Amino acid sequence: MNNLKYLFKVSKKLVANIFSNRVKTIIFFIFVLGLAYAGWKTLGNKNQTPQYQTAQAEKGTLVISVTASGQISTANSASVSTQTSGVVSIIYIENGQRVNSGDPIAEVDLDMDGQQRASQALAGYQGAKNSLDSAQANLYTLQSSLFTDWKTYMDIAQSSSYQNSDNSPKIDQRQLPQFMSTSDDWLAAEAKYKNQQGVINQAQTSVNSAWASYQQASPIIYAPISGTISGLSLQIGSVLTAQTTSSGNSSSQRIANIKTDATPTATVNLTEIDVPKVKIGNKVTLTMDALPGKTYTGKIISIDTTGVVSSGVTNYTGVIKLDSGADEIFPNMSVQASIITRVKDNTLLVPTSAVQTQNGASTVRVMKNNQITTINIETGLSTSTEIEITSGLSEGDTVVTGIISASGINQQGRSQSSSPFGLFGGGGNRNIGNPH
């Protein structure tokens, strides 16, 4: 400091002698500013001592996961729909009530279109029922013929002409036309009887289909499945208008929803990078924008490995079954899923910021007795925040994760200094890393 005072005193005398010369004056001031800058650099460097951010190597559990997004599925619900039209006259059920399949939900006073549709559907049901009754009557006739032909065959087969005294068949005699004709009559009657049983099954299916069609057009709206009613907005006096497709056929309109007791599921899109990592049974945590602050758990129950390509991007559908139901979860809610693909217990972990990798070699800086040493390590699994150390470190070792310069800026081994004088601009980068 005494040297600097002396320099300034000498400078004053020089100013008095050369003040009249402008060029020399400018040179003099540049010289003084240069001395000041050099002094600032010298004194500043003495005060800039780096401070290190550190963490300890600790044993813990490393959880590897992939993320995906999607929607809550509609697999545990069904729509209540109808093709009827008219004015609602009776409502049997309220939202939140439980119904069984086939229970009436509402009744409608049909308009002209509704009456026509109901009549056509009823005629179709009655025709199918008549066909079933006819098929059943034919079965009785065929059954009678079967028994008659079977009795004729048994009488001949057990006669002495075609059976020995020890009840063994006379093979040669049973090749005669009379015996073969009787056997064929019985076998044909049996085949017709069995075929008619198939006709009856088909007729019964037609009856069921016709009844379902009639229920869609009938003045009474029925529950298609068992569950809890939701979304029912009908009121007494509400008008249901006839719905048709572009081709003129009758179509259904939705009036409510029924949610079953099945556990909700979610479908998510997996990228082609993530799908090989995900396995059936992987645990999942789920969050929903509609339900902030709540987290749900589940597991992967299905993975569609065929994939769908859209705009050059391939996605694979994964299905997640929630561990338990929740009344607040509704179909088509957006979900974010974290799928746990691997868990490794009792492994040595450090923050990822502590590891430097170059040319395939990984190192960390270890602090011991306020001294820093760079050592080689081997790493294993990692997440965005933690990395597994397989060799080179011990539990409890202190590793450097970052550097804070004297100016308070967090550095990764380098800092930037600048001159306080705008005339000279900023200084260059300066290494403040490992002092050893």
Image (cartoon, rainbow, N blue to C red):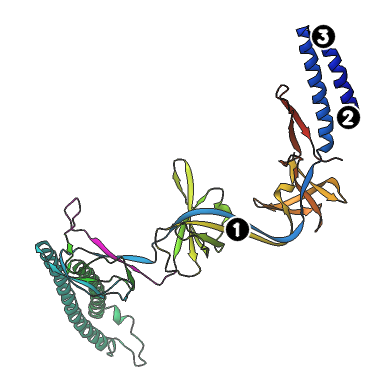
On the image, numbered disc 2 is attached to which residue? 1
Label 3: state its secondary structure.
helix
Q: Which residues are magenta?
A: 242-263
Q: Is residue 287 magenta?
A: no
Number of residue marks: 3
On the image, numbered disc 3 is attached to which residue? 18
Proximity of marks 2 and 1: CB atoms separated by less than 8 Å: no
**In the rendered structure, which amino acid carries the disc numbered 3?**
Ile
Kindly identify which numbered label has been placed on residue 384: none
Proximity of marks 2 and 3: CB atoms separated by less than 8 Å: no
Q: Residue at x 85, y 40 (%)?
A: 435
Q: Is residue 255 magenta?
A: yes
The label nearer to you, 2 versus 1, is: 2
Specify whether 331 is left or right of 234: right
Q: Please state the horizontal and vertical placement of residue 334, each as a whole percent of the image.
A: 44, 56
Kindly identify which numbered label has been placed on residue 341: 1
Q: Please state the horizontal and vertical placement of residue 388, each as a whole percent of the image.
A: 72, 54
Specify whether 168 is left or right of 315: left
Q: Please state the horizontal and vertical placement of residue 360, each as a whole percent of the image.
A: 74, 41
User: Does the magenta stretch mainly form a helix, a strand or a loop?
Assistant: loop
* Label 2, label 1: how far apart the Cα atoms are: 65 Å
Relative to 256, residue 247 above or below: above
Q: Residue at x 42, y 70 (%)?
A: 262
